[in-house]
Image (cartoon, rainbow, N blue to C red):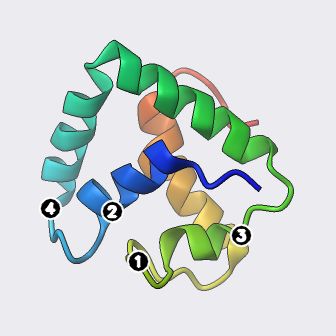
Amino acid sequence: MNDYPSLRNLLISIFSVDVGLEESDEIAALERVLSDPIQKAEIESELKQLFKDKSICWSELLENEEYVVYPADDEEDAKEYVIENLWSRVFPNETTP
């Protein structure tokens, strides 16, 4: 199983409730990260892998011992959060796989 280090870093450093950013600040921070071509390529690659990964626990990705981003009600809720807050911002003109 892939642990998605770049995505987890984004979740910890930008989206974690412990960081406490407002949504507009989260978007600005994510845009700054995506403005670096190397980081953007890593994030794009990991996101594409994530959506192909049949073993991923979406809820665990967002809430675990390291950080809490969003306490999802279920797997579908967690996946929708990732789509809305990451996929749609990284790939604004693409539908999710």
Q: Which residue is mark 2?
A: 12
Crowd rating for badge 4 (residues with CA inside 10 Å; few <14, some 14–19, many 20+): few
Q: Which mark is residue 66?
A: 1
Q: Are marks 1 and 2 in contact (CB under 8 Å)?
A: yes
Q: Are marks 3 and 1 in contact (CB under 8 Å)?
A: no
- Residue drawn at (47%, 83%) of the image: 71
Residue 66 position, x and y percent, is 41, 77
- Three-letter residue code for mark 4: Glu
Task: Tell which tag, 3 or 1, sits nearer the viewer.
Answer: 1
Tag 2's secondary structure? Answer: helix
Tag 4's secondary structure? Answer: loop
Q: Earlier in the sequence, mark 2 or mark 3?
A: 2
Q: Which residue is mark 4?
A: 22
Q: Earlier in the sequence, mark 1 or mark 2?
A: 2
Tag 1's secondary structure? Answer: loop
| 75 up-or-down from 46: above or below | below
- Residue drawn at (66%, 31%) of the image: 95
Residue 96 position, x and y percent, is 68, 37
Alpha carbons under labels 2 and 3: distance apart: 17 Å
Tag 3's secondary structure? Answer: loop
Task: Tell which tag, 4 or 3, sits nearer the viewer.
Answer: 3
Q: Earlier in the sequence, mark 4 or mark 3?
A: 4
- Residue drawn at (53%, 55%) of the image: 82
- Three-letter residue code for mark 1: Glu
Crowd rating for badge 2 (residues with CA inside 10 Å; few <14, some 14–19, many 20+): some
Q: Nearer the viewer, residue 97 or 51?
A: 51
Residue 18 position, x and y percent, is 21, 77
Q: Which residue is mark 3?
A: 57
